Image: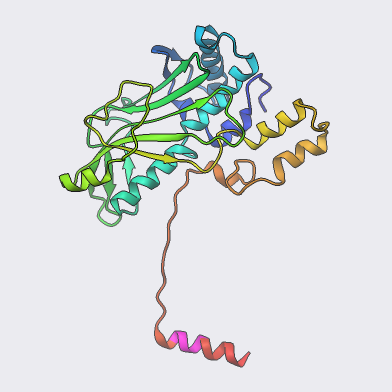
C-alpha cells in the first residue's frame, strides 16, 4: 500500500491507471516525463512527482492550496481513463456506427504512440485536458468471424475542462472530434450543434464535434467523505473509514466492486428455444 501525499493512490492503481503507462504529457505546452519501466505503483509515484511538481511551478496556479494540487493527479488520471470518459467515448462511437465492437488505434505497428496527452492550467483555476490522435483511419471495426478489419473513420481529439477543485457533483462535458467514412449527408447529420469551447487550438473546421456529459462525478466518493471529516461534520473513526469504502456507494463507484478495474464492455447473447421446448417448460411449470 502506498504511503504518499497524493490523493487516493489505491483507487488510481485499481481503476484509473491508464495514463501512467504513457510516460509523457504536455503541461502548459511543456513536456513532462515520468518513469514507466517499473511497477504500476512506481509509475504512479513517478507521475505524481513530475506532474505535481510542474503544477507547483505554474504561475497560473500559484495561489492554489497544495492539497488541491496534489488531488489534481487523481482527477487527471480519472479524466483520461477508459473506466470513465474514454469508455463512454467507445460506446458513443459504437452507437453512432451501429456496430457491436470497435477498436481505436493508439499505437503504430512499430510501437510508436499515436496519441498525445495534454493538460493546460488557467489562472481561473481550471484544468483543460485533451487526447489528440495523429494520422487518420484509426477507428477500426474487426469482423468477429473472419477477423477482417474495416476502417470506419478517424478520431482527432477528446477534450474536457474542470475546475480546481471540482464540486462533489461536478461531471465534465467532453468534446469529441471525429469523422466517419460515410456519405456527406450523414456526416453533416452527426455533427454536433453545440460549439465545443475547447481551450486548445481547435480543429473543428475539419472534423465535426460531438459532445457528451458523464453521469458519474469527477470527484471520488472517498474525497467527499474526507471533505466532510475535514470540515468537522463528524469525527472520523476506523469504523467510519471502512463504511466510507464499503457502504452507500453507487454501483459505478470504484470502491463498490473489484470488477470496475476491468474496462467496460458488454456482450449480449440471445438464445432461441424451439416451440416444443417452450411447451414442455410451460407444462412442467403447471404440474408443479
Could you tell me residue 288's position as x and y percent? 63, 89
At 50% from the left and 13% from the top, the residue drawn is: 123
At 39% from the left and 83% from the top, the residue drawn is: 274
Q: Pick the residue in front: 27 or 286.
A: 27
Could you tell me residue 231's position as x and y percent? 76, 26
Is residue 251 visible in the rendered image? The answer is yes
Residue 252 sits above or below residue 287 on the image? above
At 34% from the left and 54% from the top, the residue drawn is: 100
Answer with the quarter of the image where residue 118 lies: top left
Answer with the quarter of the image where residue 245 lies: top right
What range of the chain is rendered magenta? Answer: 277-281
- Magenta span: predominant SS is helix
Could you tell me residue 247's position as x and y percent? 72, 46
In the picture provided, is 106 more to the left or to the right than 64? left
Does 279 appear in magenta?
Answer: yes
Does 208 appear in magenta?
Answer: no
At 62% from the left and 28% from the top, the residue drawn is: 9
Q: Quadrant of the N terminus?
A: top right
Residue 81 sits above or below residue 28 on the image? below
Amino acid at each position: 500500500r502506498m504511503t504518499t501525499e497524493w490523493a487516493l493512490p489505491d483507487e488510481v492503481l485499481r481503476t484509473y491507471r491508464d495514463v501512467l503507462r504513457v510516460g509523457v504529457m504536455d503541461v502548459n505546452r511543456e513536456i513532462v516525463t515520468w518513469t514507466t519501466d517499473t511497477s504500476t505503483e512506481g509509475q504512479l509515484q513517478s507521475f505524481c512527482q513530475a506532474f505535481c511538481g510542474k503544477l507547483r511551478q505554474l504561475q497560473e496556479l500559484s495561489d492554489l492550496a497544495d492539497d488541491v494540487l496534489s488531488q489534481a493527479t487523481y482527477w487527471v488520471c480519472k479524466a483520461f481513463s477508459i473506466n470513465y470518459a474514454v469508455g463512454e467515448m467507445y460506446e458513443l462511437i459504437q452507437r453512432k456506427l451501429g456496430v457491436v465492437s470497435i477498436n481505436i488505434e493508439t499505437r503504430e505497428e512499430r510501437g510508436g504512440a499515436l496519441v498525445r496527452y495534454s493538460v493546460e492550467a488557467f489562472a481561473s483555476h481550471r484544468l483543460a485536458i485533451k487526447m489528440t490522435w495523429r494520422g487518420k483511419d484509426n477507428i477500426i471495426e474487426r469482423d468477429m468471424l473472419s477477423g477482417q478489419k474495416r476502417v470506419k473513420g478517424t478520431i482527432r481529439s477528446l477534450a474536457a475542462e474542470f475546475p480546481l477543485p471540482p464540486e462533489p457533483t461536478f461531471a465534465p462535458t467532453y468534446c469529441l472530434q471525429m469523422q466517419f467514412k460515410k456519405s456527406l449527408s450523414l456526416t453533416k447529420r452527426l455533427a454536433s450543434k453545440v460549439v465545443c469551447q475547447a481551450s486548445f487550438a481547435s480543429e473543428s473546421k475539419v472534423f465535426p464535434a460531438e459532445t457528451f456529459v458523464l453521469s458519474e462525478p469527477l470527484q471520488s466518493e472517498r474525497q467527499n467523505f474526507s471533505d466532510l471529516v475535514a470540515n468537522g461534520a463528524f469525527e472520523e473513526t476506523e469504523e467510519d473509514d471502512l463504511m466510507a469504502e464499503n457502504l452507500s456507494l453507487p454501483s459505478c463507484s470504484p470502491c463498490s466492486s473489484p470488477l470496475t478495474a476491468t474496462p467496460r464492455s458488454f456482450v449480449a447473447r440471445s438464445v432461441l428455444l424451439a416451440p416444443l421446448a417452450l411447451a414442455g417448460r410451460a407444462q412442467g411449470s403447471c404440474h408443479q
